[in-house]
Amino acid sequence: PPTLQPTHPPICNPSFTSELSLFVRRAHMAQAEAADMTIMASTFQGGPTPVNGMVRKILEEDALNPAYRPLPADEDEDWKMFIRCGGAGEVADTPEQQIARYQTETKNSVECHPGRAEHYLKKPDLVITTSMDYLVRTWDVSNEYKMHQEFEGHLNFVNMAIGYKGDRILSCSDDFTCRLWKIGEAGEKGEVLFTYWINMYPMKCICALPGERAGVGGLDKIVRIFSLLTGCTLFRMVDHAKYGPERNFFQKEGCGAVWCMLHLRNNIIATGSDDCTVRLWDIDQGTQLDMKIGHLGYGEDIGEPGIGWKLSERFASVLRLTHLGEDGMQFASCSYDRSVVVWDATDPSNLQVLRRWQVAENGVLGIKHIGQDLIATAAADNYCKLWNFKTMEMVAEIPCRGIPMDALMIDEDTFVIAGGDATLRVHKIKE
């Protein structure tokens, strides 16, 4: 395969670039609340029995406080907001009511169908980067990739940031928080709209969800669904921490941190963990739908000191997930064990491995769908490679000065690589 060279001078970022995302600032993206329902019968099983009622309960500490005066239910605006954001109710949704909640006007919107290729295989206005300098930055694609804005506020490494609703950014960090930012004009300081304190553990991944919600995971081994309007946690799913294959072997060894998360479609998300599993979840029920192992570890390639030890031979932390343009029916994952796995999530209760192959000589840190049948992999062997994910054939390889961390499509012939040398590098695919 040909070796690709940069076609644009590298763009310097003052620190290690750890994650790339695109941001398309268009009118139809601002209508992200609208969605068409191409609904599979197995996707919607009804909503859960609500934990909270329609009227705020009086807590014991409030009842013992002689100065406490409860608000009438019709005046308790905070509780009304909590109800509207999915935190309360009287009875569980039927499947029909659940389907109706996802029925909206615009067909196949990005909010409910983020896995459709037309949503992310388009030329973005801005590229979003996160890094170890605690900052989120945006870069203007139409202005020679000059920095558009800088978003300062996180107090530790920023692990992931994604565009949201056409004019905002969601980010998560090792400072235990997720933050919602407002995109402004070039040169303006990024404005933080909301800080969500999640837990006393670093947060490693975040995804936007329908209904003003978000999912987040991190080193506390918990998958959380929370409201972007109130910050309230709607579901707290602990299966990664407690349950796993082979009688919970990896959980007993201390694994279960959630490293990646992907909204597949409607009410279904996927997560990957250092417990070696990929799992599917129902965000309306707060339940796990399926769990599978696809990455099988280094095996005997781990070397003499590790042979015979399950944790060293078969440990394969799942690091990143990416869509493949099949409306969330298929996606791919990459892992520490040098491999990529393509998954079939057509039936969310029966996740299947379609293909698995080795793509690098060291751990694969990033993976992105960059056009038609192509994915880009970024690995610790200092190579970014392009693959046909249907034939598993390598199309091109790009040697990198530092360890590449991620790649992102700009248009059908252009993509960028972000890496540990603190740069963005622009490449032409056809060349």
Image: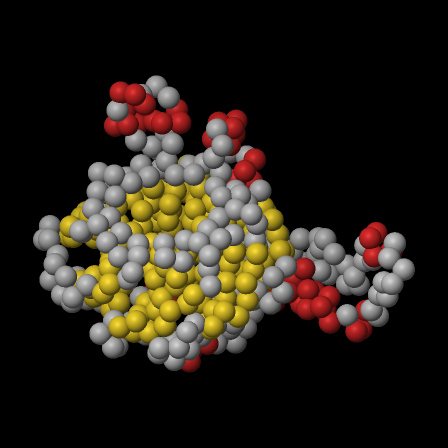
* Quadrant of the image occupied by residue 297: top left
Rendered view: 195 above or below 186 = above
The one nearer the camera, 177 or 242, is 177
Q: Quadrant of the C terminus?
A: bottom left
The one nearer the camera, 322 or 75, is 75
Q: Position of residue 190 (x, y in %)?
A: 43, 72
Q: Position of residue 201 (x, y in %)?
A: 52, 46
Report the residue at 39% width, 39% height from top. Answer: 317
* Quadrant of the image occupied by residue 313: top left
Rendered view: 15 above or below 298 = below
Report the residue at 30% width, 57% height from top. Answer: 15
Q: Is residue 391 visible?
A: no
Rendered view: 392 above or below 329 = above
The one nearer the camera, 230 or 194, is 194
The one nearer the camera, 173 or 398, is 173
Q: Residue furthest right?
A: 66
Q: Position of residue 381 (x, y in %)?
A: 21, 42
Q: How many marks?
A: 0
Report the residue at 77% width, 59% height from top. Answer: 53
Q: Is residue 295 visible?
A: yes
